[in-house]
Image: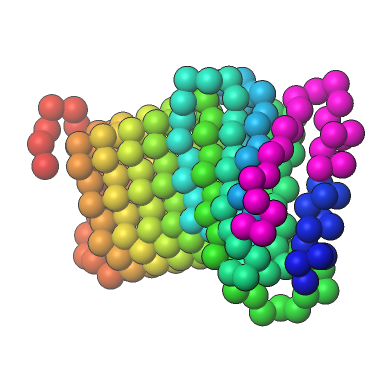
Amino acid sequence: MRLSVLAATLSLVSVASVAFAGSSTVTRSTTDHEKHDERYQIGVKPGQRLEVQLDTGAGLEITGWDKNEAVIETRWRESKCPDARVDVVTIDDGVRVTSKYAPDTGDTHSCSMEIEIHVPKKFDVRVKSSGGSIALSDLRGTIQGHTGGGELHVEHLRGSIDLRTGGGAITVKDSDLDGTLETGGGHVSFSNVTGPVRASSGSEQGVKRGKTKGDSY
């Protein structure tokens, strides 16, 4: 099994070096093939978009920073996520990160993976994940997405948001937002949140709302 995953990883290096010649280049480094600790670097511009589609699910953290560069770091062990593959590619207006299982490996899988991403602070984000927590911080833009289950943590965001989880707590801090957050079950917590943002939980009554600037909780 390890040989098949390693072969796929080596194949990815070859494809990346050819497919992006003359455009934004995906630079990949691996610290440990056994652990699959990998780091990808891509030149980007503020105002572009990050697309994340995780068929394997993952604990996902996306943070904005003051660099015109996207850095994607993945951490997973083959024993905890067999038959998995992560791909990072450039698209017309940004970056796409995907995780999937190798073909012909059956319908039942178990995976434990962590993905940490840094992008410019002004960046749109779209996420589709089969499961796992999502943490977002220091971003300005449009945030859309859902996870099959896991906590949602939002901090220092400005813009619009449409984010859902099948179950898990929602925490929003120090943000100015419009839009909605929803969970199938879990506590909802707002702290220093302004704007017409709303959050609801299937296990709690009522809707949490952002405050008008100057109001207190």
Q: Disc count in the image? A: 0
> Does the magenta segment cover residue 59?
no
Q: Nearer the viewer, residue 184 or 62?
A: 62
Give the quarter of the image for residue 213.
Answer: top left
Q: Residue 147 at what x, y percent from top left?
A: 50, 59
Q: Residue at x 74, y 33 (%)?
A: 26
Residue depicted at 20% across the width and 36% down the height = 192
Q: Is residue 175 visible?
A: yes
Is 158 situated above or below 9? above
Q: Quadrant of the N terminus?
A: bottom right
* Quarter-of-image position of residue 138: top left
Q: Residue at x 85, y 21 (%)?
A: 22
Magenta span of residues: 13-35
Q: Is residue 86 left or right of residue 116?
A: right
Q: In the depicted view, which residue is nearer to us: 59 or 153?
A: 59
Q: Position of residue 44 (x, y in %)?
A: 64, 24
**What percent of the width, then of the height, locates residue 6?**
78, 58
